[in-house]
Amino acid sequence: MEYCLELRNVSKSFGEVQALEDINFQLGRNEIVGLLGDNGAGKSTLIKIITGYYRPTSGVILFNGRKVDHLSVSKARQLGVEAVYQERALAELQTLWRNIFLGRELSNKWGLLDITKMRQETHRLMTQSMGFTSSAVNPESRVGTFSGGERQGVAIVRALFFDAEIIILDEPTMGLSLKETAKLVNFVRDIKKAGKSAIFIDHNVLHVYNIADRVVVIDRGRIAGQFSTKDITLDTLMEKMIRVAETGSLD
């Protein structure tokens, strides 16, 4: 498999605290990888390294097989990395079209904001990608009126529109109802349909298992194991997660 992202022997320490140790992590093209682990396992630190927020203490990061030195937030975005955090990073009082293009507004040939085009693109995304069919929802609708799952969908579609190659979803099901979670799962599956890759972080093993091609378990700053979901049952995966939480090992 070709990797769009690879971390080799990546470690990160904060003073005397070792947050990550010798992490080897791969994300294939058009692959969804689930990242599982308890609070404090190192998931957030790993994601902040991938998004350029933290620089590793040691190790190598490769995008599309090429080593990247001094990865920053802006460089990670240029390389096609977009993160959708549980806070969803949306302006609730703003309209849908403003949220879609927030910080990356479209301009016309005179350098002025092309509001008409942004509204048209938003309508297209609503109907083709987000599945909004109600006439009550339009590009001028305020995002604050949307449900949790719909807001997550907006953030995912925004990332896809701006040609993200790797979309990181950080605890996207937190606070969602079962119905909204099901809708979110469809949004995540659309990432793969679009030929992109995703890292799906969640505490809920069931959510991850149902959507990921592969599951990576992190514990105490180390990779405790990884499994192809087609080769392991949900019950077995849950048993392994319990064993890791109790002993720090899969053995």
Image (spheres, grey):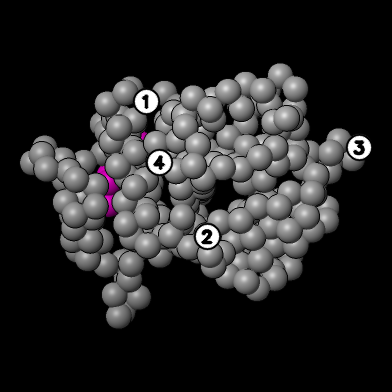
Residue 169 in view, yes or no: no
State which tag comes first along the sequence, 4 or 1: 1
Q: Tell me the distance, in whole angstroms, between the alpha carbons under discs 3 and 1.
A: 37 Å
- Image location of residue 87, percent across then percent down: 47, 34
**Main secondary structure found in the magenta portion:** loop
Residue 209 in view, yes or no: yes
The quadrant of the rendering that contains the C terminus is top right
State which tag comes first along the sequence, 4 or 3: 3
Q: Tell me the distance, in whole angstroms, between the alpha carbons under discs 4 and 1.
A: 16 Å
Q: Secondary structure at mark 4?
A: helix
Q: Residue at x 91, y 37 (%)?
A: 16
- Image location of residue 232, percent across then percent down: 50, 37
- Image location of residue 32, percent across then percent down: 46, 50
Q: Badge 4 is on which residue?
A: 211
Q: Which residues are magenta?
A: 92-97
Q: Badge 3 is on which residue?
A: 16
Three-letter code, disc 4: Ile
Q: Residues within 10 Å of mark 1 (few under 14, many from 20)?
A: some
Give the mark toward the camera: 1 or 2. Answer: 2
Q: Tell me the distance, in whole angstroms, between the alpha carbons under discs 4 and 2.
A: 15 Å
Q: Badge 1 is on which residue?
A: 176
Q: Nearer the viewer, residue 124 or 196?
A: 196
Q: Tell me the distance, in whole angstroms, between the alpha carbons under discs 3 and 2.
A: 33 Å
Indicate which disc residue 28 carries.
2
Q: Residues within 10 Å of mark 4 (few under 14, many from 20)?
A: some
- Image location of residue 224, percent across then percent down: 70, 37
